[in-house]
Amino acid sequence: MDHRIGLIAVNGLDAFALADLFPTLPEERFASSHSWAWLRFDPTVVEEERWIAQAEREPLGKARRPFLVIRGEADRSWRISLYSPKQEPLHLAFHHDFYRPPTQPLEDLLDELDATVPEDFQTMKEEVGKGSGTSSTRLKSLDAVKKAQAKRVGAWINARDDFGDGDQARRVLSGKACSPGERLGPFNVLPQFLDTLSLGKAFGTEDSAWQVGPEAGSVGSFDRSRSLYATVPRAELIAGGPIELPVDDLARFWLLPWFCETDSETDLLIVPKAGTRLRLPRTDGSVEVHRRGAQTYIEITWNPPGRRVSTYRELCQAIAAAPAGTTIEFIAGRMPEDDSDDASLQAGDQRYLGSLTDQGTFLLTHSSVAANPADFLAAMEICRQIDQPKPSFVMPSEQDARGVLELARGTDWFVDAGALPRVKGKSVTAASRDEAMTTMMMVFRKRFEAGPWNTIGGQQQDEVSHQEWETAIQEVEKSLAKAFAAPEGGDIILETERAIFRSADWSKMNVGFLDALDTLCGPCEQEDMPPTPTEKLWPIDRAFTNLKFTRLGDVHCNRFGELYLRGYAGPSGDTFAAIAVGTLGQFAFEFVTPLAGGGSLTTSTTPDLKDKPKAGIYKRSFPTLTPAALYQEHRSALAKLTAAHAEAQPIEATTEGFCRALDDYIKREF
C-alpha cells in the first residue's frame, strides 16, 4: 500500500455481505462505513487479481448493489471501474500527467499514457481536438479530456441515490477542487475523489478514526501535530440523559472546553439525515470544511475569543437548519505548539454528541465529561450569558461570589483592577462588554471547581503565567529604573519612612532618552539634538521669577528615580511651584496648594489628572498653558474651592518644607 493502490468497494453492504463475493478471504480483510464496505488489496498479487476477475464476472453477486474497483500506482496513474445493475461498466483511467503542465504534444502524451493501461481504460481521444499546436492549445485540449471524463463519472454518481456527491466529484476530477500540492502528490486527485464518495478512510492504512485532510492519513489543514478526532476521549452515554437543549446552544458548546483550557480548538462532525446534504455559509481562513459523502467535518483553528463567537454562531445557525435526525459531534482539544510543549494539559480535550429533533431542539446524548443533566443545564445557563451586554450571575453564596473575584485576580485576563468582575453579595457582574467572556470563564471555573469539568488545570496554568509575567515586568522595571535613573544627588535634605530626598545638580542630567530617540529616528537627518534639561528649565524658571516665586532648591527623590525637581515658594505664602524633568524626556511644571484636612489643589501641565474629592484632593490639567496662564487658572480654582469651604494652608517656604510637601504627596498617592 505504500506505492500501489487497490480497492474493491460495494455501496450499501456491510463487511459480511462483501465477504459473500469473496468467501475465501479472511473476515478481518474487510472494513465498512455508514454506506460502503471495502477491501484493500495489492493489485500485483496474482491470487487477488483472480478475486477481482471473479468480481468483474459476477460483480453484484446476490445483492444487486453498485460496485467499484480502483487500481493504480503512486506517481503514475489510477483507474476506476464502475459497475451497476443492467448497465455496461464504466472504465476510466486518470493519469497524473493530466493534472500537470504538458511537456510534449498532447496526442503523443496520450499515446504514451494509454500504452500503460488496458484497452478499456484508454483515453477518449475524440475529446482532444486539435491538440498538437501551441502550449495553450494543448492545455485547453487536456482540460477537455479531464472535463469529459469527470462529467461521465459525476453523472454516474448522481444517478444513484445515497452514493455520493457527483457534482463535487466532477470538480475534483477536473482538477478544480484540488490544490497544486495535491495535484503533484503521489496519488494525485484520488484521495479527494474518495472523499466525495465517503471512502476517504478506505484509502488510509487503518480505519480506527476519522482523519481529516486531502489524504486519509493527514491530521488536518492547520499544521496540527496530531489528529484531533483520533486523540480526544470517546463520548459515552450521559447518565440520566438525554438532555434537550435549545438549538441556539449549538453555537455555545465550544465555550465548555475553552473555559477549561483556552488553547483548545473545537471541530464539528455533522452527519445529516440520509438523502440530505448540509449547506454551509462561506467562511474565512480559520475554517476548513471536509466533505465525505453525507458527512461533513469542519475544522476551526484557534483564533481570538471574539472572532470565535461570530464564527461558531454563523456556522451553527446553518447547521441548526438541517433536518431532524442530523447528528452533530463536537470534538475539542489542545494542540501542542511544538515537541517541547506540555502535552499533559488536557483539560480542554472534550467530546459531545447529539442530534437535531423534530421539535427544533438539540438532544445531547453522549459526553466525554462525566456530567449529569443538572450539570449541563447549569453550564449552558452560564454559556448563554454570552449574548448579554454585561453578563450577570447569582452565585450560591457570597463566599462563592468573592471566590470568582479572587480567581480573576490571579490571571492576566483582566487588564487592570477596573476590568475585574463586580461583586455585590451573591451577585457577580462583568465590568463591561469587553470582559463578558472572561467573567463567564471565572464563574464557570468557580461553579465547577469540584468537577465534573477539569477547571483546576487551566486556572493553575493561568495563575503561573500571570506570576511569571508579573515577575518579568518587575525585572524590566528595575532594569529600566537603573538604566534611566537620574544621578542620585548629593547631601540628604530629608529622610522619611517613605523616601530619601537629596540635593540635585542639574548639570549632571543627560538629554532625555525619549527626546534623543525622537531625534535619532526623526525624518530630518540634519536635526539638532534636543535641548538639555537645563536648557528646558531656564525659560520656566524666569517665568516663575516674574510671578514673584522664590527658588527653594533642586531635589532628587529616590521614589522618582528618573526625575529632578526644582521647588519654588509663591508670594501668597500658600502655594508651591515645581518643575519636574526626567531622563526619559519628561518635562512638566505645576502649582500646589495644601488644603485643610490633608487635601490639596494641583494645577499642572501633566495631562489627564483626576480628582479624588472624597480625600479632598483636586487636580486640574492644562498641558499647553504658559506658567502665567497656568498660575491664573490655579488661583481661580483655589478661589472656587475656598468659597466652597475649602481652606488653604500656609507652606513652609524652605527646601526641606518643599521635600515634606513631596513626602505628603507620596503618602496620599501611594
Image (spheres, rainbow, N blue to C red):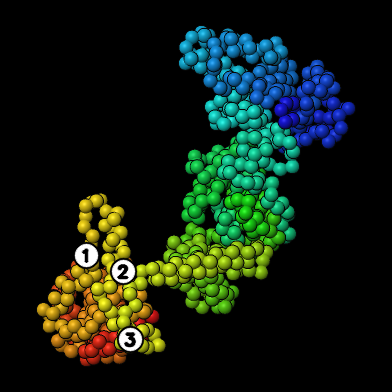
Q: Would residue 117 appear left or right of 564 to someone viewing this image?
A: right
Q: Kindly identify the amino acid type of the residue bearing the numbered disc 2.
A: Thr
Residue 537 in percent (x, y) is at: 20, 72
Crowding at dot 2, Cα within 10 Å, few <14 / some 14-19 / many 20+, comes out as many
User: For the residue carrying disc 3, how many other residues have a C-alpha within 10 Å: few (<14), some (14-19), or many (20+)?
Assistant: some
Horizontal arrangement in the rendering, residue 590 relative to residue 332 (left or right)? left
Q: CA distance from mark 1 to mark 3?
A: 29 Å
Q: Mark 3 or mark 1, which is nearer the start of the sequence?
A: 3
Residue drawn at x 27%, y 62% is 515
Given residues 654 and 667, the one toward you in this image is: 654
Q: Nearer the viewer, mark 2 or mark 3?
A: 3
In the picture provided, is 567 more to the left or to the right than 46? left
Inspect the image, locate mark 3, and give the three-letter code of the amino acid beneath it. Answer: Ile
Mark 1 highlights which residue?
531
Dot 2 or dot 1, earlier in sequence: 1
Q: Are marks 2 and 1 in contact (CB under 8 Å)?
A: no
Quick check: 328 above or below 136?
A: below
Q: Name the quarter where the C terminus is drawn.
A: bottom left
Please name the residue shown 71% across and 60% down the image: 370
Q: Amino acid at mark 1?
A: Pro
Screen quadrant of the N terminus: top right
- Look at 57% across and 31% down and name the residue there: 181
**Quarter of the figure with residue 161:** top right
Q: Where residue 461 sits: x, y (%)?
A: 59, 64
Seen in the picture, residue 256 relative to 140 is either above or below; the reply is below
Q: CA distance from mark 2 to mark 1?
A: 12 Å
Residue visible at 27% across and 66% down in the picture:
511
The residue identified by callout 2 is 583
Q: Are dots 2 and 3 in contact, CB under 8 Å?
A: no
Q: What residue would you read off at disc 3? A: 492
